Image (cartoon, grey):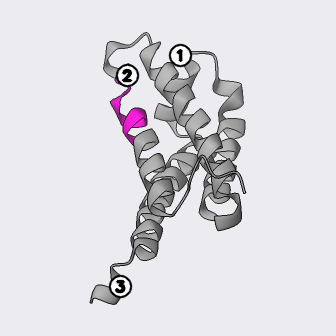
Amino acid sequence: MKKYLTRTNIGWVLSGLLAIVLLGSAYAKFSGDKDMAEMLGSHNLTGWITIIGIGEVASLFLFLIPKTMRLGALLLSAYFGGAIMFHMAHPNPEANNFLAPAGFLIFVWVIAWIRGLNIFDLD
Protein backbone atom coordinates (compact mmCIF):
# COMPACT_ATOMS: atom_id res chain seq x y z
CA MET A 1 0.00 0.00 0.00
CA LYS A 2 2.86 2.34 0.82
CA LYS A 3 4.19 2.21 -2.73
CA TYR A 4 0.92 3.74 -3.99
CA LEU A 5 1.01 6.71 -1.64
CA THR A 6 3.90 8.44 -3.34
CA ARG A 7 4.16 12.17 -3.85
CA THR A 8 3.80 11.65 -7.61
CA ASN A 9 0.62 9.59 -7.31
CA ILE A 10 -0.96 12.00 -4.84
CA GLY A 11 -0.12 14.89 -7.17
CA TRP A 12 -1.77 13.16 -10.11
CA VAL A 13 -4.90 12.27 -8.13
CA LEU A 14 -5.26 15.88 -6.98
CA SER A 15 -4.60 17.07 -10.54
CA GLY A 16 -7.39 14.78 -11.72
CA LEU A 17 -9.80 16.26 -9.17
CA LEU A 18 -8.89 19.76 -10.32
CA ALA A 19 -9.38 18.68 -13.94
CA ILE A 20 -12.86 17.33 -13.21
CA VAL A 21 -13.94 20.62 -11.62
CA LEU A 22 -12.43 22.84 -14.33
CA LEU A 23 -13.73 20.71 -17.19
CA GLY A 24 -17.20 20.91 -15.63
CA SER A 25 -16.89 24.68 -15.43
CA ALA A 26 -15.69 24.87 -19.03
CA TYR A 27 -18.55 22.60 -20.15
CA ALA A 28 -21.02 25.01 -18.54
CA LYS A 29 -19.43 27.84 -20.52
CA PHE A 30 -19.43 25.92 -23.82
CA SER A 31 -22.96 24.55 -23.44
CA GLY A 32 -24.53 27.96 -22.91
CA ASP A 33 -25.62 27.33 -19.32
CA LYS A 34 -28.23 29.93 -18.37
CA ASP A 35 -26.76 30.63 -14.92
CA MET A 36 -23.25 31.01 -16.33
CA ALA A 37 -24.46 33.41 -19.02
CA GLU A 38 -26.41 35.41 -16.46
CA MET A 39 -23.48 35.68 -14.09
CA LEU A 40 -20.94 36.65 -16.76
CA GLY A 41 -23.51 38.91 -18.40
CA SER A 42 -23.60 41.02 -15.24
CA HIS A 43 -20.18 42.37 -16.28
CA ASN A 44 -20.92 42.45 -20.04
CA LEU A 45 -18.85 39.30 -20.66
CA THR A 46 -21.55 37.31 -22.47
CA GLY A 47 -19.72 37.56 -25.79
CA TRP A 48 -16.51 36.27 -24.19
CA ILE A 49 -17.86 33.11 -22.53
CA THR A 50 -16.41 30.76 -25.16
CA ILE A 51 -13.01 32.48 -25.10
CA ILE A 52 -12.92 32.28 -21.30
CA GLY A 53 -13.76 28.56 -21.51
CA ILE A 54 -11.03 27.96 -24.09
CA GLY A 55 -8.52 29.75 -21.86
CA GLU A 56 -9.62 27.67 -18.91
CA VAL A 57 -9.20 24.37 -20.76
CA ALA A 58 -5.89 25.39 -22.38
CA SER A 59 -4.46 26.46 -19.01
CA LEU A 60 -5.59 23.20 -17.44
CA PHE A 61 -4.00 21.05 -20.16
CA LEU A 62 -0.75 22.99 -19.90
CA PHE A 63 -0.83 22.42 -16.14
CA LEU A 64 -1.39 18.69 -16.55
CA ILE A 65 1.55 18.18 -18.93
CA PRO A 66 4.72 17.87 -16.81
CA LYS A 67 6.96 19.87 -19.18
CA THR A 68 4.52 22.80 -19.34
CA MET A 69 3.29 22.69 -15.73
CA ARG A 70 5.00 26.01 -14.89
CA LEU A 71 3.21 27.85 -17.68
CA GLY A 72 -0.07 26.14 -16.77
CA ALA A 73 0.33 27.11 -13.10
CA LEU A 74 0.99 30.71 -14.13
CA LEU A 75 -2.03 30.80 -16.47
CA LEU A 76 -4.32 29.14 -13.91
CA SER A 77 -3.12 31.67 -11.33
CA ALA A 78 -4.08 34.47 -13.70
CA TYR A 79 -7.43 32.78 -14.43
CA PHE A 80 -8.32 32.39 -10.76
CA GLY A 81 -7.01 35.87 -9.97
CA GLY A 82 -9.46 37.20 -12.52
CA ALA A 83 -12.22 35.06 -11.04
CA ILE A 84 -11.47 36.47 -7.59
CA MET A 85 -11.72 40.02 -8.90
CA PHE A 86 -14.88 39.18 -10.86
CA HIS A 87 -16.61 37.86 -7.75
CA MET A 88 -15.41 40.74 -5.57
CA ALA A 89 -16.88 43.26 -8.02
CA HIS A 90 -20.13 41.39 -8.67
CA PRO A 91 -23.20 43.59 -8.05
CA ASN A 92 -25.26 40.72 -6.62
CA PRO A 93 -24.34 40.18 -2.94
CA GLU A 94 -25.06 36.45 -3.30
CA ALA A 95 -22.42 36.11 -6.03
CA ASN A 96 -19.64 38.25 -4.61
CA ASN A 97 -18.14 35.51 -2.45
CA PHE A 98 -14.59 35.07 -3.71
CA LEU A 99 -13.61 32.22 -1.37
CA ALA A 100 -14.19 29.46 -3.95
CA PRO A 101 -11.83 30.86 -6.62
CA ALA A 102 -9.31 31.77 -3.90
CA GLY A 103 -9.47 28.19 -2.61
CA PHE A 104 -8.95 26.81 -6.10
CA LEU A 105 -5.96 29.12 -6.58
CA ILE A 106 -4.39 27.77 -3.39
CA PHE A 107 -5.26 24.22 -4.54
CA VAL A 108 -3.42 24.80 -7.84
CA TRP A 109 -0.27 25.90 -6.03
CA VAL A 110 -0.46 23.03 -3.54
CA ILE A 111 -0.77 20.56 -6.42
CA ALA A 112 2.12 22.22 -8.24
CA TRP A 113 4.26 21.96 -5.10
CA ILE A 114 3.32 18.30 -4.58
CA ARG A 115 4.14 17.55 -8.21
CA GLY A 116 7.57 19.11 -7.73
CA LEU A 117 7.26 22.64 -9.10
CA ASN A 118 10.09 24.74 -7.74
CA ILE A 119 9.25 28.27 -8.75
CA PHE A 120 12.77 29.53 -8.04
CA ASP A 121 14.50 26.85 -10.13
CA LEU A 122 14.75 28.29 -13.63
CA ASP A 123 16.53 25.32 -15.27
Q: Earlier in the sequence, mark 1 or mark 2?
A: 1
**Where, by quadrant of the figure, is residue 4 drawn?**
bottom left
Mark 2–mark 3 distance (CA, rounded to whole Å): 40 Å
**Where, by quadrant of the figure, is residue 111 drawn?**
bottom left
Quick one: quadrant of the N terminus?
bottom left
Q: In this rendering, is residue 9 above or below 102? A: below
Mark 1 touching mark 2, by CB under 8 A? Answer: yes
Taking 52 as reference, is 8 left or right? left
Q: Which residue is mark 3?
A: 4
- Residue at point 72%, 57% (across, down): 123
Question: What is the crowding at mark 2: few (fewer than 14 residues within 10 Å), some, or many (at least 20)?
Answer: few
Q: In this rendering, is residue 69 above or below 35? A: below
Q: Is 11 in front, or is 41?
A: 11
Please, what secondary structure does the residue beneath circle 2 have? helix
Q: Looking at the rendered structure, which numbered label has been put on residue 42?
A: 1
What amino acid type is highlighted by mark number 1? Ser
